[in-house]
Image (cartoon, rainbow, N blue to C red):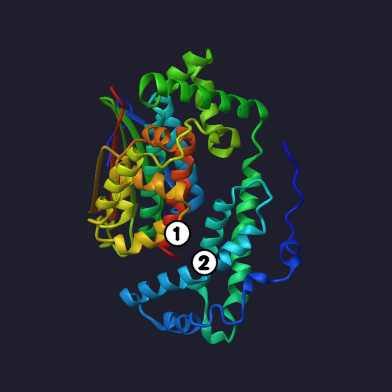
Amino acid sequence: MTTRPPLTSTEPEAAGEPERGGEDEFGDLEPLLEEYAGLEPGSRRDELRERLITGYLPVARRLAIKYRDRGVPVEDLIQVASIGVLNAVDRFQPDHGANFLSFAIPTIQGEIRRYFRDRTWSMRVPRKLKELHVSIANASSTLSAQLNRAPRPSEIAAELGVTLEEVVEGLQAGEAYTSTSLDLKLSTDDGEGSYLGNMLGEADSRLELVEYRHVLRPLLEALPERERTVVMLRFFGELTQTQIAEQVGVSQMHVSRLLAKTLENLRRQLEPG
Amino acid sequence: MLEDDGATSDLLIELRLPPRAKSIATVRAVAADVTSRADFDLDAISDVRMAVDEACTALARLASPTHLMRAVFSLAGGYLRVDISARVQPPDRRIDTGGFGWHVLGSLADELSTEHGVGAHGDEVVIRMAKKSAGG
């Protein structure tokens, strides 16, 4: 396991504050913040919220990029930072005389630090369980290809010559442990194949039919492409995780984690508070 | 609601929890555990785990903070059934079945329903889900 320098509160800011951008980069958003804070729930408020969040996303991106050398995909960091933007927009009180960025930047950084803290905790899984988990992931890929569906724990146990109990424990360890070795590309397809394109098109037309699409769509658009693809295929394309894994070129376990994480983020955004 | 003395039932486990995120994380882990032990395939295990998380979170938003929620897991006829219930305040609150959360539940579960105004005090909301063991 690699050791990384501790995540201190001063380090990322040390390079100055270019994330603020030019003085008037967000000038046209400021009056909207005031209007937003005074509005009752309703479509105007939803519309403003969306514009504000989209407008301030560059701040999240700039802050997230500062943490890019810490072994986490930068798109994951941007997603985490975007939650900070959502929270900042929802909590900001313009009448306190404060500048929005002075409020938003620490909020976003807090969200990123919390992510790293939780992630560090999740790495403390005994080596033996990690190894078992990697074996399970490999066996699962092999079996999925053979069976043309996701394997059962008993089938994985038979394949690896271990007990069912060990497989159950190994699967649980996987929930706490994010291994980059599980993110191995299983297919050389870059994810833009025509089958995938067709499935996404179908999923998209189903999304068009639901009543809450106006709220959901901007949130989906803000997701990294891979996350958006798995959510669309699972919930609007009705593909199984194993089928998605095959299309996107990652393991089923990785799809499972991406889905769980993305759902949680979407839930937080759809139901602030 | 599963009315059963537990002696002869298909009941696997029943949990009571405060409507809080930390406790929901535990129920989610239990959901994955019982589904793995019942030898559902990996897709189904992950689906049940996410569905239980989604349903508990939706109910926790409505739940009376001073009462425990309940999660009941049972297994019969190749189906894992999960009933999650909470006493809500005010008692006429119900699950929004027109939103993304409910849509997600519908994709994850093979059977899904909700009822409100049930329970001994008439103030419970329940979400019932069932997942079929693939090919079984």
Query: Of A89 and B117, which appears nearest the observer?
Result: A89
Q: Is residue B29 visible?
A: yes
- The residue to which callout 2 is attached is A57
Quarter holding the C terminus of chain B is top left
- The residue to which callout 1 is attached is A222
Mark 1 residue type = Ala
- Please report the residue visible at 46 percent of the width from the left and 68 percent of the height from the top: A54
> Is B91 located above or below residue B30 in the figure?
below
Q: Secondary structure at mark 1?
A: loop
Callout 2: residue from which chain? Answer: A
- Please report the residue visible at 64 percent of the width from the left and 57 percent of the height from the top: A113
Q: Is residue B26 left or right of residue A125?
A: left
Quarter holding the N terminus of chain B is top left
Mark 2 residue type = Leu
Question: In the rendered structure, which disc, 2 or 1, sits on the residue that comes first in sequence?
Answer: 2
Query: Of A198 and B135, which appears nearest the observer?
Result: A198
